[in-house]
């Protein structure tokens, strides 16, 4: 019998981070925290190497217990996975053959998982003309969703980075509850926006626990038809430490579910021992950093008041965020501030070179860049930017050793869309320099 081996094609997997088949000096195709992995987390992973001769805990009790402590979600509703991708795939398999309503463009992994599970994707097309506005999504759900359908979206959205504000998020949850639909929110980039506590869907799950507890105490049970219960318990949140703590090589994702029957069903679709001892150690250490941030406590640097420039010194390659005397400072506050600072600088630099080049192509003295820029930058609340241009940025920057994300394969986009990560100051400087040269070489 002749065996035919499957050959992986480009259409099977298209993501950022493919540094293995390219000669890359700077990777701006993946959107990880530019401050790098915290020292505390890195050291915990190093210590965990002494446990590699043991099986990890198949139930991940310590890690799930700490996740419950920090988030307030009951432990029975928490799952951990080998990255968010494994959990997305397990969720789609749990809802196999159902319809999935999703705004596009969005993370390509959603369709990959839905196709594998035989789910039908029902797409809500966002428009670049109105900056990928999501305000019409609740009405789309109202008109198209049915009982048992899945509403899947990211906050902030990927690849454009716009946040879904609280009022709109509340409306989406409310309409989904009216339609008796499940909701899955991907929050892998939310922490780095600085608005996690305000916007995370975890708060709906916390409220659901309170509702269930109150009703069980008063009536002894909760019916599936209870409006409050339906509105909240059919919600799942997917998150990961990958982007937040700059550990994509570790692969550690989390799922929070309001309905423990759903989480139990998804758990049965995950492999045993899917989290390594090193990943679990990273997660436990990361949670101590996260807990400090969520409790609004600041690390103290004794004897000195650091200037903004001193606080943002970042040794990315050594995977440690340091100030000038090598004392680790408050990780999240400085990560969020640094991203905001560098993102604004990138926007200004791109607009500057784009505007100058556009003006050179016209004889008018009008603000040509505002109307017809060489590179359009879309609004972003996240640690990445979506660009649109006729210049082949992917090829041009790749030839200069810089990898960015070509977004032409995103449904709802097409040729000329690119995503760049907000990286270290040095990497951002290099990107801006190479971009200026590339634009100068191209006669648009």
Image (cartoon, rainbow, N blue to C red):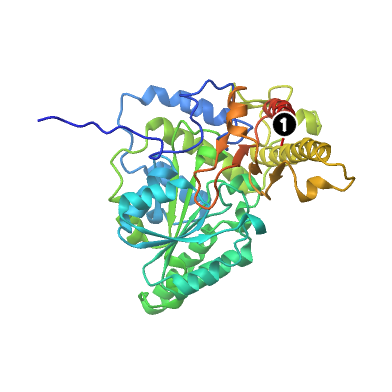
Up-down relation of residue 435 to residue 378 (above or below): above
Q: Is residue 117 left or right of residue 1?
A: right
Per the image, the residue denoted by label 1 is: 439
At x 31%, y 52%, the residue is 117
Identify which residue, 376 or 90, lies in the foreground: 376
Quadrant hosting residue 279: top left
Task: Tell me the SS state at disc 1.
Answer: helix
- Neighbour tally class for label 1: few under 14, some 14-19, many 20 plus, Cα within 10 Å: some
Identify which residue, 261 or 98, lies in the foreground: 98
In the rendered image, the quadrant that contains the N terminus is top left
Whether residue 306 appears in this view of the structure is no
Residue 54 in the image, given as x and y percentages of width and height: 31, 28
Identify which residue, 441 or 281, lies in the foreground: 441
At x 85%, y 47%, the residue is 367
Residue 231 in the image, given as x and y percentages of width and height: 46, 71
Up-down relation of residue 228 to residue 99 (above or below): below
As drawn, the residue found furthest toward the right would be 365
Residue 250 in the image, given as x and y percentages of width and height: 45, 32
At x 61%, y 34%, the residue is 392
As drawn, the residue found furthest toward the left would be 1
């Amino acid at each position: 019998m002749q065996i035919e081996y499957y050959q992986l094609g480009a259409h099977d997997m298209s993501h950022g981070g493919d540094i293995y088949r390219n000669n890359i000096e700077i990777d701006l195709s993946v959107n990880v925290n530019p401050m790098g992995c915290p020292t505390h987390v890195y050291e915990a992973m190093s210590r965990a190497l002494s446990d590699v001769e043991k099986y990890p805990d198949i139930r991940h009790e310590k890690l799930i217990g700490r996740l419950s402590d920090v988030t307030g979600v009951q432990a029975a509703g928490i799952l951990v996975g080998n990255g968010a991708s494994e959990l997305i795939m397990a969720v789609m398999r749990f809802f196999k053959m159902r319809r999935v309503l999703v705004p596009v463009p969005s993370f390509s992994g959603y369709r990959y998982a839905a196709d594998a599970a035989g789910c039908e994707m029902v797409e809500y097309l966002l428009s670049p003309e109105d900056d990928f506005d999501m305000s019409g999504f609740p009405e789309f759900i109202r008109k198209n969703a049915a009982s048992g359908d899945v509403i899947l979206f990211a906050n902030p959205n990927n690849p454009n980075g716009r946040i879904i504000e609280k009022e709109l998020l509340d409306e989406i949850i409310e309409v989904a509850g009216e339609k008796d639909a499940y909701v899955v929110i991907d929050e892998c980039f939310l922490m780095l926006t600085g608005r996690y506590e305000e916007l995370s869907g975890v708060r709906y799950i916390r409220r659901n626990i309170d509702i269930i507890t109150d009703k069980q105490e008063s009536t002894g049970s909760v019916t599936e038809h209870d409006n409050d219960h339906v509105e909240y318990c059919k919600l799942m949140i997917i998150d990961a430490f990958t982007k937040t703590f700059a550990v994509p090589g570790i692969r550690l994702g989390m799922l929070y579910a309001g309905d423990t029957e759903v989480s139990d069903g998804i758990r049965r679709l995950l492999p045993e021992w899917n989290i390594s001892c090193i990943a679990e150690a990273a997660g436990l250490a990361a949670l101590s950093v996260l807990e400090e941030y969520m409790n609004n406590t600041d690390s103290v640097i004794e004897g000195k008041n650091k200037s903004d420039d001193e606080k943002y010194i970042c040794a990315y390659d050594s995977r440690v965020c340091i100030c000038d005397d090598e004392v680790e400072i408050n990780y999240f506050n400085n990560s969020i501030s640094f991203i905001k600072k560098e993102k604004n600088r990138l926007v200004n630099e791109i607009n500057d070179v784009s505007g100058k080049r556009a003006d050179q192509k016209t004889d008018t003295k009008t603000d040509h860049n505002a109307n017809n820029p060489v590179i359009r930058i879309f609004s972003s609340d996240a640690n990445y930017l979506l660009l649109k241009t006729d210049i082949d940025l992917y090829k041009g920057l790749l030839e200069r050793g810089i990898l960015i994300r070509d977004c032409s394969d995103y449904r709802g986009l097409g040729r000329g869309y690119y995503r760049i990560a907000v990286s270290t100051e040095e990497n951002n400087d290099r990107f801006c320099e190479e971009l200026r040269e590339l634009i100068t070489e191209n006669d648009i």
